[in-house]
């Protein structure tokens, strides 16, 4: 902000006018809108009416005299920062935080584009090696976070946990995770992932119990402070929690998965329809020519060009998206089938079954998204489940009345 506003303030009734705080006179700001406002009139008023204040103002905007660098200073500006200098350490720490928070690969420090950016931002900074980040920077960051979490958890009387065994998508290994949730003294919900460790060998209840107890001991959390542990519905998980002597609950999202698969997607008529649907979508996925022909039909029918969604059989929500995409493109697919050959055909009954299946799955998909949010709690889960049951009852009532 200009030092000029020490002597003026914008008029509350008309922002095109500034009031002099010395003589209280209103001075035009040089226009009627913000784009045309300037300070010329204000400086002129200060110069003509208040010379002492004008002189003071001019001192604040007096340009600084340039300083000619010496040869030594010029060379120093070209020298690389020492690795142990404060600025170099802070830059390395920020890069480590970026890698951790944004899930960046460690190879980022070797990336030419990133190195070019850092060279532009601070030419004197020497990028640390990948080994340095792995062996020093990231472990230092981890220790800092662990120390902070220990302090935060120290006086929390009750802590809720979430645990799961899951497989990595990038390498053949199983991971056992433990996430903590608690309410602090300000009644703010806090959460932190305490562990995500490789879990080798047999996944027996005894081994799961041993690993989770070890995790709790590492953080100094006694069993009496464990409010509840949220787990999946597998028998080994249930037994492990029971043998530990802690309260546990099954994951709502996992329960919904079982409900959908065992109650709907396991029915023969539905599985047969889904199999035909996959063949049709797969036909277009593997044939660019077929897709281009379908797109031409979509344009001719003024439907807008949209691609069909391929599902993943282990994820029922992807089956819903596939059904919805097929139902949306039913007209275009019918025209295509009349002109070309598809690997499978859908009968009128199957089209109707697809529509009803999608209608049933939509509330479950919405509920799954709601309860899977990072901030979800029992206050979100219970009303959402009640809403699903209510919608299903209304649907049955409509069907029985037809």
Image (cartoon, rainbow, N blue to C red):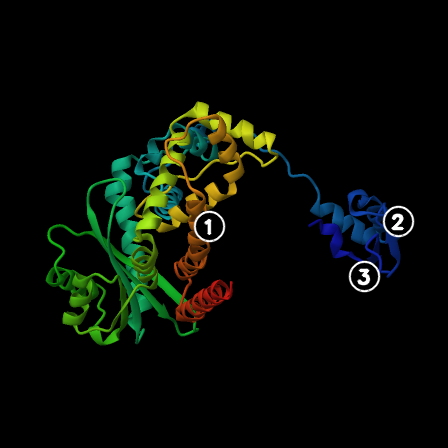
Residue 291 image offset from top left, x and y in percent: 46, 28
Which label lies toward us, 3 or 2? 3
**Residue placed most toward the observer, 131 or 194:** 194
Q: Picture quarter containing residue 371?
A: bottom left
Task: Answer whether residue 329 is visible to the viewer in this image.
Answer: no
Residue 267 image offset from top left, x and y in percent: 31, 53
**Residue placed most toward the observer, 71 or 344:** 344
Question: Closer to the N terminus: mark 2 or mark 1?
Answer: 2
Residue 398 image offset from top left, x and y in percent: 50, 64
Label 3 – label 2 distance at C-alpha:
25 Å
Judge from the rendering whether residue 283 lies leftward or rightward of residue 164; answer left or right.
Answer: right
Q: State the SS at label 2.
A: helix
Residue 212 image offset from top left, x and y in percent: 18, 63
Judge from the rendering whether residue 346 lies leftward or rightward of residue 247; answer left or right.
Answer: right
**Mark drawn on residue 355:** 1
**Mark drawn on residue 12:** 3
Name the residue tied to disc 2: 48
Q: State the SS at label 1.
A: helix
Q: Residue at x 14, y 70 (%)?
A: 243
**Residue placed most toward the observer, 132 or 390:** 390
Judge from the rendering whether residue 66 lies leftward or rightward of residue 290; answer left or right.
Answer: right
Pointers 2 and 1 in contact (C-beta within 8 Å): no
How dense is the environment of label 2, judged by Cα within 10 Å: few (below 14), some, or many (20 and up)? few
Looking at the image, residue 4 lies above or below residue 299: below
Question: Closer to the N terminus: mark 3 or mark 2?
Answer: 3
Outermost residue to the top: 289
Question: Closer to the N terminus: mark 1 or mark 3?
Answer: 3
């Amino acid at each position: 902000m200009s030092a000029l506003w020490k002597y003026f303030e914008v008029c509350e009734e008309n922002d095109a006018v500034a009031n002099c705080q010395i003589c209280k006179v209103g001075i035009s700001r040089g226009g009627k809108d913000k784009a045309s406002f300037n300070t010329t009139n204000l400086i002129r008023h200060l110069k003509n009416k208040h010379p002492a204040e004008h002189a003071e103002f001019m001192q604040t905007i007096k340009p600084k005299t340039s300083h000619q660098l010496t040869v030594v200073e010029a060379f120093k500006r070209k020298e690389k920062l020492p690795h142990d200098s404060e600025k170099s350490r802070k830059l390395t720490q920020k890069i480590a935080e970026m890698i951790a928070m944004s899930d960046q690969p460690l190879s980022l420090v070797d990336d030419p584009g990133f190195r070019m950016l850092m060279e532009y931002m601070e030419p004197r900074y020497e990028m640390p090696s990948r080994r340095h980040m792995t062996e020093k920077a990231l472990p230092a960051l981890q220790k800092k976070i662990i120390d902070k979490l220990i302090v935060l958890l120290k006086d929390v009387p009750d802590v809720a946990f979430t645990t799961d065994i899951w497989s990595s998508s990038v390498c053949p290994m199983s991971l056992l995770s433990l996430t903590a949730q608690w309410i602090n003294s300000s009644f703010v919900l806090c959460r932190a992932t305490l562990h995500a460790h490789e879990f080798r060998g047999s996944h027996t209840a005894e081994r799961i119990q041993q690993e989770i107890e070890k995790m709790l001991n590492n953080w100094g959390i006694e069993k009496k402070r464990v409010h509840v542990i949220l787990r999946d519905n597998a028998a080994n998980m249930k037994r492990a929690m029971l043998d530990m002597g802690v309260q546990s609950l099954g994951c709502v999202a996992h329960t919904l998965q079982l409900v959908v698969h065992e109650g709907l997607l396991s029915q023969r008529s539905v599985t047969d329809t889904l199999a035909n649907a996959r063949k049709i979508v797969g036909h277009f996925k593997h044939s660019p020519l077929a897709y281009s022909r379908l797109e031409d039909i979509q344009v001719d029918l003024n439907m807008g060009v949209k691609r069909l969604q391929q599902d993943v059989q282990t994820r029922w929500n992807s089956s819903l998206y596939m059904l919805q995409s097929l139902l949306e493109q039913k007209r275009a697919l019918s025209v295509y089938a009349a002109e070309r050959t598809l690997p499978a055909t859908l009968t009128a009954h199957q089209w109707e079954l697809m529509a009803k299946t999608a209608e049933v799955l939509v509330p479950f998909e919405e509920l799954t998204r709601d309860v899977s949010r990072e901030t979800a709690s029992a206050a979100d889960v219970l009303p959402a489940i009640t809403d699903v049951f209510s919608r299903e009852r209304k649907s049955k009532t409509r069907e029985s009345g037809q």
